[in-house]
């Protein structure tokens, strides 16, 4: 009899999961904890980068902030994350394609895989202007349409939309989400994301001296 309440609770949890009556998972810009750039405030734009290696782990998201008066692209977003996180690596081609995305020697997906048809697909969270297809730098104002919100917002209308351009031709706006997923041509965007691990800062000369002092004291 003592086990019955626990069994009932487990049965209820399974029922809610199977029937879908539980609230679906939502991941918004306000849930991002790992930010790169200045503090939030007036005149500061915000965007999110999601990387999905299509492996056993979930996609990861990083937040990026910048001065609203400075035009930025998807390449600036990825470059900023790469510059802040030395465990992350990627190759950006001269026309804006991304390949060889790796994480600390553990997660890695390379270039186009002829056997599976997989490559790094690029998605954004705003509609694309019809007929504007370019891999390089897009014309001024090209496909700058309002962001739709988080692609992981169950309340909508956020969604992943295949980009007409590479990352060099993607103008960022406040509220932009950029997603890269290693998948084939039929991909609908990165899978559900969680926060990326906290950025580990590069050791400074002061921290190096402190570590040396601690090491000498312990000897």
Image (cartoon, rainbow, N blue to C red):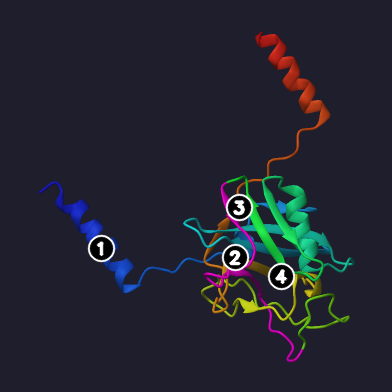
Measured Cα–Cα span from mark 4 to mark 3 = 18 Å
Q: CA distance from mark 3 to mark 1?
A: 32 Å
In three-dimensional space, the C-alpha distance between marks 4 and 1, rounded to whole angstroms, equals 38 Å
Say if the magenta span includes residue 142.
no
Q: Residue at x 74, y 88 (%)?
A: 129
Determine which quarter of the picture holds residue 53.
bottom right
Q: CA distance from mark 2 to mark 4?
A: 10 Å
Q: Is residue 41 visible?
A: no
Q: Is residue 34 above or below residue 147?
A: above
For image coordinates 68% across by 41% down, the residue present is 200
Label 3 residue SS: loop
Q: Which residues are magenta?
A: 106-131
Check whether the beta carbons of the residues at disc 2 and disc 1 lie within 8 A of each other: no
Mark 4 lies on a secondary structure that is: loop
Identify residue for label 4.
175
Residue 203 higher or lower than 114, as above or below: above
Give the residue drawn at x 31%, y 73%.
Answer: 19
Q: Earlier in the sequence, mark 2 or mark 1?
A: 1
Few, some or many C-alpha atoms within 10 Å of disc 2 (few <14, some 14-19, many ≥20)?
some
State the residue in front, 50 or 32: 50
Mark on residue 12?
1
Q: Residues within 10 Å of mark 1 (few under 14, many from 20)?
A: few
Residue 28 located left or right of residue 10? right
Is the residue marked by circle 4 packed among few (<14), some (14-19), or many (20+) residues within 10 Å?
Answer: some
């Amino acid at each position: 009899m003592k086990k019955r309440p626990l069994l009932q609770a487990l049965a209820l949890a399974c029922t809610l999961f199977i029937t879908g009556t539980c609230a679906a998972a939502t991941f918004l810009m306000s849930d991002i904890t790992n930010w790169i750039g200045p503090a939030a405030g007036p005149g500061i734009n915000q965007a999110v980068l999601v990387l999905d290696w299509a492996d056993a782990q979930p996609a990861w998201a990083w937040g990026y902030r910048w001065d609203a008066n400075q035009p930025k692209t998807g390449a600036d977003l990825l470059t900023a994350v790469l510059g802040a996180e030395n465990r992350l690596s990627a190759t950006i081609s001269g026309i804006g394609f991304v390949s060889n995305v790796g994480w600390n020697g553990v997660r890695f997906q390379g270039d186009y895989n002829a056997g599976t048809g997989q490559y790094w697909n690029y998605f954004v969270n705003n509609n694309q202007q019809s007929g504007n297809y370019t891999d390089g730098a897009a014309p001024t104002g090209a496909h700058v349409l309002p962001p739709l919100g988080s692609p992981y917002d169950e309340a909508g209308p956020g969604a992943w939309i295949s980009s007409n351009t590479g990352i060099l031709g993607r103008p960022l706006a406040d509220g932009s989400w950029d997603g890269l997923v290693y998948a084939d041509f039929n991909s609908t965007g990165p899978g559900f994301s969680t926060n990326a691990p906290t950025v580990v800062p590069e050791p400074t000369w002061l921290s190096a001296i402190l570590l040396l002092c601690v090491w000498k004291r312990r000897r």
